[in-house]
Image (cartoon, grey):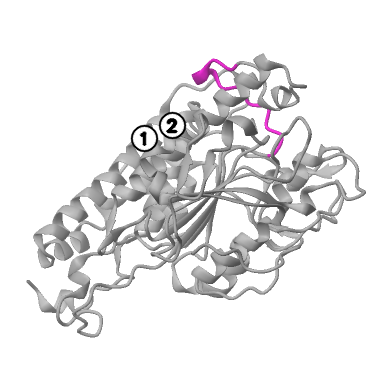
């Protein structure tokens, strides 16, 4: 085993190639003598956080578990997450007060998205003077983002837009973004899987090299093969297997992106952006897989993903829901419409469960990626028919590196600020944020 290679191998090692940089996952060999200041203990895995947003709330009596604490039973909507029951916390009673009108009239869907992570009341405008607040992900990225190649990554499924009126006088920027770099600047999300992938692993200063690689349909691994070969020869057998699995996942993502981009274009009226998969299930899974490798390689520790923009009226033919989601959400207690929405809710939870499964099966040190993460899933709107913003559908998967007591359903008093949860997550990311929106303290997760 080459000591010269091992002496340079650490958590931030990046395989280099023309116009390309590919980070490594956490390896046992990173703790061998001569590595990481000759430590004999396993490298400490960082804590990551991702905030997933769903549109149009949920059918709450199908979402909320029964029982309480450790003695709870999953609801029909959350039942697909049964394999991760002990890895997550389900909450009730959390509220996002500034998603409410508070004198501003209609526009609950736009306020839902814009207040979700900011905890702030958006200014009602469809002009350029948009104002809401800095979101929790960006507040954390501002403090610790320099520790990784990317401070954060923002992903989405709907392209959306940042101008015009999208909801009762609210700018489309409010409906299309949950991540806000500042009170007036949303963080642009990537909806094209290839663009997201290249953002993580490509060198934006080598555009010509990147274009040539894509034109020739070569893998990113082809460009780092010499570095990869040297590292592989220098590490243990177990790490070689981990590297092989990691490289295979990279090739798989690239192949799926290529297939999606080369598929026949859909009919024009579907208005699908170029390069975005026409199959929703594949699109969502690709974005979750990109989040997985982003965390696995420590390319970033902070991410957001909008499964749909606020007020999305997408159909879900995979579960035989061919009516628009937003239209259905104003169900007026029609049982048939509510049953269709519950089908959509469960379908999206199933996609989320696939992500959790991959996180949990990715070993990292003495644990796994899910253990070392905090994955928020939910919305700042509960019952879309009533446009309610209290008792929200919120769950948190992962143990934050062992700092969160999971396997519980925690029923907080109604009107407990959702922002209290965000302050607790910030603490576990190694940052101290004293106030967000109407927060009244740090939510106890222990």
- Distance CA(mark 1)–CA(mark 2): 9 Å
Compared with residue 403, is residue 347 higher up or lower down, i.e. above or below? above
Q: Residue at x 43, y 33 (%)?
A: 80
Residue 186 image position (x, y, % from top left): 69, 56
Q: In the image, which disc is placed on residue 282?
A: 2
Q: Residue at x 18, y 79 (%)?
A: 40
Residue 221 image position (x, y, % from top left): 27, 52
From which residue to which does the magenta span run? 310-321
Left or right: residue 1 versus residue 153 is left
Q: Residue at x 22, y 72 (%)?
A: 30
Q: Residue at x 56, y 26 (%)?
A: 344
Mark 2 lies on a secondary structure that is: helix
Contact check, label 1 and label 2, Cβ < 8 Å: yes
Mark 1 lies on a secondary structure that is: helix
Where, by quadrant of the figure, is residue 37 drawn? bottom left
Instruction: Say which residue label 1 marks.
Output: 256
Where, by quadrant of the figure, is residue 112 drawn? top right
Q: Please tell me which residue lies in front, 52 or 260.
A: 52
Q: Main secondary structure of the magenta part?
A: loop
Compared with residue 365, is residue 105 higher up or lower down, i.e. above or below? above
Residue 154 image position (x, y, % from top left): 56, 52
């Amino acid at each position: 085993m080459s000591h010269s290679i091992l002496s340079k191998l650490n958590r931030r090692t990046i395989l280099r190639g023309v116009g390309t940089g590919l980070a490594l996952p956490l390896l046992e060999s990173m703790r061998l003598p001569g590595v990481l200041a000759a430590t004999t203990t396993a490298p400490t895995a960082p804590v990551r956080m991702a905030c997933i947003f769903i549109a149009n709330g949920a059918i709450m009596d199908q979402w909320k578990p029964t029982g309480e604490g450790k003695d709870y039973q999953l609801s029909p909507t959350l039942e697909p997450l049964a394999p991760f029951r002990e890895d997550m916390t389900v909450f009730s009673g959390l509220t996002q007060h500034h998603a409410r009108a508070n004198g501003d009239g209609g526009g609950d869907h736009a306020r839902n998205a814009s207040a979700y992570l900011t905890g702030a009341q958006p200014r009602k405008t469809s002009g350029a003077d948009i104002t809401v607040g800095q979101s929790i992900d960006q507040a954390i990225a501002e403090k610790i983002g320099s520790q990784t190649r990317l401070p954060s990554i923002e992903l989405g499924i709907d392209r959306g837009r940042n101008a015009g009126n999208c909801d009762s006088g609210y700018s489309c920027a409010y409906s299309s973004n949950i991540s806000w770099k500042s009170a007036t600047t949303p963080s642009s999300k990537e909806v094209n899987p290839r663009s997201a992938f290249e953002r993580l692993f490509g060198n934006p200063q080598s555009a010509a090299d990147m274009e040539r690689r894509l034109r020739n349909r070569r893998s990113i691994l082809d460009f780092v093969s010499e570095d990869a070969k040297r590292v592989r020869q220098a590490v243990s057998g177990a790490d070689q297997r981990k590297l092989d699995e990691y490289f295979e996942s990279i090739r798989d993502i690239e192949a799926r992106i290529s297939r999606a981009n080369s598929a026949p274009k859909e009919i024009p009226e579907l208005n699908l952006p170029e390069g975005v998969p026409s199959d929703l299930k594949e699109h969502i899974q690709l974005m979750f897989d990109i989040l997985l490798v982003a965390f696995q390689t420590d390319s970033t520790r902070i991410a957001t993903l909008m499964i749909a923009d606020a007020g999305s009226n997408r159909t879900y033919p995979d579960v035989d829901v061919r009516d628009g989601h937003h239209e259905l959400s104003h169900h007026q207690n029609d049982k048939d419409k509510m049953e269709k929405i519950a089908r959509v809710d469960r379908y999206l939870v199933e996609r989320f469960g696939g992500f959790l499964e991959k996180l949990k099966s990715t070993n990292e040190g003495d644990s796994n990626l899910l253990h070392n993460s905090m994955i928020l899933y939910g919305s700042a709107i509960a019952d879309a028919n009533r446009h309610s913003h209290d008792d929200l559908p919120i769950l948190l998967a992962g143990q934050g590196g062992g700092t969160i007591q999971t396997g519980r359903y925690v029923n907080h008093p109604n009107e407990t600020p959702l922002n209290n949860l965000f302050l607790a997550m910030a603490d576990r990311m190694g940052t101290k944020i004293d106030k967000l929106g109407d927060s009244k303290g740090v939510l106890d997760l222990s």
